[in-house]
Image (tube, rainbow, N blue to C red):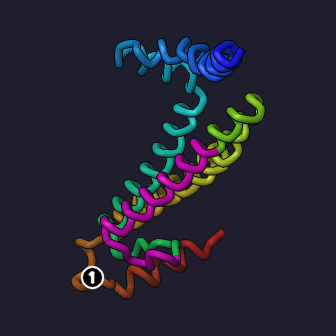
């Protein structure tokens, strides 16, 4: 009788372990098949990541371009200061990218455990960032294009702060 009970207990313990081997067959697939599986099951997440990375990268690139084209071009982000170097600008942008993408992946993972439709919540910050960065990029490009032909750029100033150029740029930005 003890042998039968022991066998049943062993079978009850071992059966869930044997039943879990079926999903592991996906893990035994080739690395290319696993990448394909990931791409097929995470399309929305990857598109969201691409939008966030492209938005922050374009903002950083347009900020760096504007600051290189004119010393009167000032950064409005109070954390990095009015004249950040390229490393500070790209570092802040990268930190923002990693934070948002990491948060999206965390939400995606948590929604997988609870409710699949909740995964669409990742689009809220993605859309907000995409729209706000469009305005920032447009402002950077317009400012750089405006300041260069008016002699407010680095060629028209003998000193890097260029007080006349900064005063001109502030007056221009104050106009409606």
- Quadrant for the C terminus in the image: bottom right
Is 18 or 65 nearer to us in this picture? 18
Main SS class of the magenta portion in the image: helix
Please provide percent x and percent y for residue 25.
Answer: 48, 12
Query: Tag 1: Cα neighbours inside 10 Å, few (<14), some, or many (≥20)?
Result: few
Please provide percent x and percent y for residue 147.
Answer: 40, 67
Residue 37's place in the image compared with 145, above or below, is above
Pick out the residue farthest to the front: 1
Q: Relative to 156, is 115 on the left or the right?
A: right
Q: Over which residues does the magenta segment extend? A: 78-106
Which element carries disc 1, helix, strand or loop? Answer: loop
Is 7 or 114 nearer to us in this picture? 7
Q: Relative to 77, is 174 on the left or the right?
A: right
Q: Relative to 32, is 110 on the left or the right?
A: right
Q: Residue at x 59, y 50 (%)?
A: 103
Please provide percent x and percent y for residue 173.
Answer: 56, 72
Q: Which residue is drawn at 39% across and 80% down?
A: 165
Residue 124's place in the image compared with 137, above or below, is above
**Residue tagged 1:** 160
Q: In which quarter of the image is residue 16?
A: top right
Residue 163's place in the image compared with 75, above or below, is below
For the question of whether residue 148 can be seen, the reply is yes
For the question of whether residue 151 can be seen, the reply is no
Quick check: is 96 in the magenta stretch? yes
Please provide percent x and percent y for residue 127.
Answer: 66, 43
Q: Which residue is drawn at 42% across and 81% down?
A: 166
Q: Relative to 175, is 96 on the left or the right?
A: left
- Quadrant for the N terminus in the image: top right
Residue 120's place in the image compared with 124, above or below, is above
Q: Quadrant of residue 92?
A: bottom left
């Amino acid at each position: 009788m003890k042998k039968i009970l022991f066998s049943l207990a062993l079978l009850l313990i071992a059966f869930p372990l044997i039943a879990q081997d079926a999903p592991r067959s996906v893990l035994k697939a080739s690395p290319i098949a696993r990448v394909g599986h990931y791409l097929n099951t995470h399309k929305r997440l990857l598109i969201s990541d691409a939008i966030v990375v492209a938005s922050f990268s374009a903002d950083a690139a347009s900020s760096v371009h504007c600051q290189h084209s004119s010393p009167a071009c000032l950064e409005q982000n109070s954390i990095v200061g009015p004249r950040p170097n390229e490393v500070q600008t790209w570092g802040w942008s990268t930190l923002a990218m990693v934070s948002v993408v990491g948060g999206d992946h965390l939400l995606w993972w948590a929604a997988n455990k609870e409710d699949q439709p909740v995964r669409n919540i990742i689009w809220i910050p993605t859309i907000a960032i995409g729209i706000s960065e469009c305005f920032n990029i447009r402002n950077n490009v317009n400012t750089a294009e405006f300041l260069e032909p008016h002699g407010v750029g680095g060629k028209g100033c003998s000193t890097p702060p260029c007080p006349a150029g900064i005063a001109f740029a502030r007056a221009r930005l104050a106009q409606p």
